[in-house]
Image (cartoon, grey):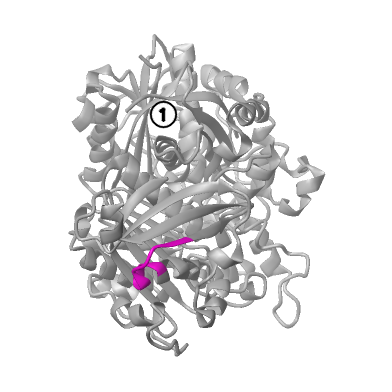
Amino acid sequence: MMRAYVTGVAVWGPGLAGWEASRPILAGEAPYVATATPPPLPSILSATERRRTGTTVRLALAAAQAATEMAGLEPDALRSVFASANGDGAVVHAILETLAGTDRSVSPTHFHNSVHNAAAGYWTIATGSGAAATCLGCHDATFAAALLKAMAEVACEAAPVLLCLYDAPLPEPLDSKRHTEAVFAAAFVLAPGPDGCLAVLEAEYAAGPASAELAEPRLPALRGLSRVNPAARSLRLLEAIARQVPDACCAGLLDGRVDMRIAPCSTAAAS
Amino acid sequence: MRPLGISAHTVVSAMGRGKAATLAALRSRQGGLRPCDFEDVAPDGKIGGYIGRVEGLEAHSLPEALAGYDCRNNRLADMALRTDGFAEAVAGAAERHGPERVAVILGTSTSGVLASEDAYRHRDGAGALPAGFDFERTHDLFSLSRFVRAALGLRGPAMVVSTACASSAKTFIDAHQLIAAGACDAAVVGGVDSLCRMTLYGFSALDLISATPCRPCDAARDGISIGEAAGFALLERAESEIALLGYGATSDGYHMSAPHPQGVGAIGAMREALARAGLRPDEIDYVNLHGTGTRANDAVEDHAVADVFGPGVACSSTKGWSGHTLGSAGIVEAVIAALCIREGLLPGCLNLTEIDPGFSAGVLAENREQAVRRVVSNSFGFGGINCSLVLGRPG
């Protein structure tokens, strides 16, 4: 199994307003109430760049910034893996609408924001980062695939990696073909060494489907959310980090899965 | 790094179908660009310009069991899988390693977006998309890797990388990392991007499409010609004639659609690639440039290449043949790099009248025959993503 240490974590979704507020909920110590939770504005983004970005990108950056700050790392040298099933659906829809009309003058800003790696681009611009960045889009397997990629990068490069997952609903009429609910983001800083770690994570790919019991959140109240937003498939891992007890879980990747083992850092150090 | 073997590779672009056709186009200096005749995109020189279109896609059909994936992008993927014996080579790898140990890691920038473009034009009175439109298996990014994985009968990890014009180059890095970390034993890498209105009109909106066939490195260059292509490589720890020797990946952290003016990210990617390969700059025989043909890209890249390799290194862009195939440019040019090494051929830039007098790298204007051991291939994308690969004979 590939191993990494979680040194930073962030979450943003309905009723989950940042890690501090969400930790007791995810640990089952406080009730979950699915209230609308407007995403925060990432302070790293300049006013100009903020105007150029939409909700989806800003949410991703806010989560990335929070996890990086918790890890106590300077973002300008941090490798990053951004991952989103839908990307910025509002931008894609706007372009498709334009292309279906008679005047097909696509907005230049829309076009350069339409690249799937827009969030990664704005992140590296905002942080002045020269480090490797990538972006994956893997439908409902986005969490599993991106986790596998980030874990492999930590192991192979012996360097910390920021993993940022984000997804939001597509506008109509796309939503009727690919339904997503809520606006959700989660970010993890995965490091090769245990300094300042919250949990130790091991992961590997395995053939055979994921069982719902191991893939879905323990809290029944969160299961609906994990089914309607691809980024929210990370909720089981977020719960395991919050609970601070050893856990095993998985995430589906087509007809295979990524198996995970999570333990509090103190336990892992002793094992 | 330990060289990672390239056991098989193939490419389909406007240059032709397969390695032999691509090599013949390079040798004869016969490019594949033609006036834009794609769908209803007007060939008025303002929008469209020239394109690199793959012949026969409209008539190509997917295997019956995978017909639900039908769209231009997946047809192009399927055509490449059935070229140069690539699918058969992957079947061999699946038998050696087990189908669950072979990953599919592919890059695309727009996947099957053309299907959504068409569907938007056929909305009903209430604005709903046609009942038969299958977003998940066409437009969705993951459609590409799902289709290829199913077509090859693989059961391993799958992902789609979408980092604009660096997408398919990046898949070599992901495969190396997954194999090194033990997550798989072999990987199908590469990518596919196909013609669509979104990129033709989008690059036009940025005023980046040339009215003529693109002229990378030319003093009068004025933009890109968009092309479409599919290419694949099978990577595994095995003896091979040509291997991935090194890679470098950086970010500009500068601008969404303009390169860093001093090419800091590009220089960093090339230096990192050399360091991983354990090679000095003078041990590289040829640099296949990203060389899109825009004013900014080619000038910045020339500066960066000269900075890393000195003024003499032989370099050129092959986009005058293929057009800029966006997310698939990295795999197209990796396959071209492999052909150059095997055949001892350095292609000079096509459509070149006068090398930009401000350039200081050794831009090739004509083909040259010489022994080629190692090639650096550059791919840069919107969002400031830079990727350099070193391909060569191992050892």
Disc 1 secondary structure class: loop
Asked if residue A33 is among those painted magenta in the image, a careful observer would answer: no
Where residue B239 appears, x then y in whole percent? 48, 17
| A29, B51: nearer the viewer | A29
Residue lying farthest right? B64
Residue at the spot 40% in from the left edge and 77% down from the top edge? A26
Query: Is B335 placed left or right of A193 in the picture?
Result: right
Counting every numbered tag in the picture gives 1
Outermost top residue: B370
Q: Position of residue B224 (x, y in %)?
A: 45, 44
The residue that appears at 53% across and 31% down in the rendered structure is: B233
- The magenta stretch spans which residues? A240-248
Q: Position of residue A270 (x, y in %)?
A: 27, 54
Mark 1 belongs to chain: B
Residue A57 appears in the picture as rendered: no
Residue for point 49% across, 35% down: B331
- Residue B169, placed above or below residue B1: below
Residue named by callout 1: B352
Q: Is residue A147 left or right of residue B188?
A: left
Q: Nearer the viewer, residue A267 or B17?
A: A267
Q: Position of residue B29 (x, y in %)?
A: 52, 21
Relative to A3, does residue A99 appear above or below in the rendering?
Answer: below
| Observer able to see residue B369 | yes
A188 lies left or right of A258: left
Task: Look at the picture and state if B324 lies above or below A120.
Answer: above
Quadrant location of the N terminus of chain A in the rendered image: top left
In terms of depth relative to the viewer, which is nearer, A77 or B74? A77
Instruction: Answer with the quarter of the image where residue A228 lies.
Output: bottom right
Circle 1: residue type: Leu
Q: Quadrant of residue A21?
A: bottom left
Where B391 falls versus B126 (above or below)? above
The quadrant holding residue B127 is bottom right
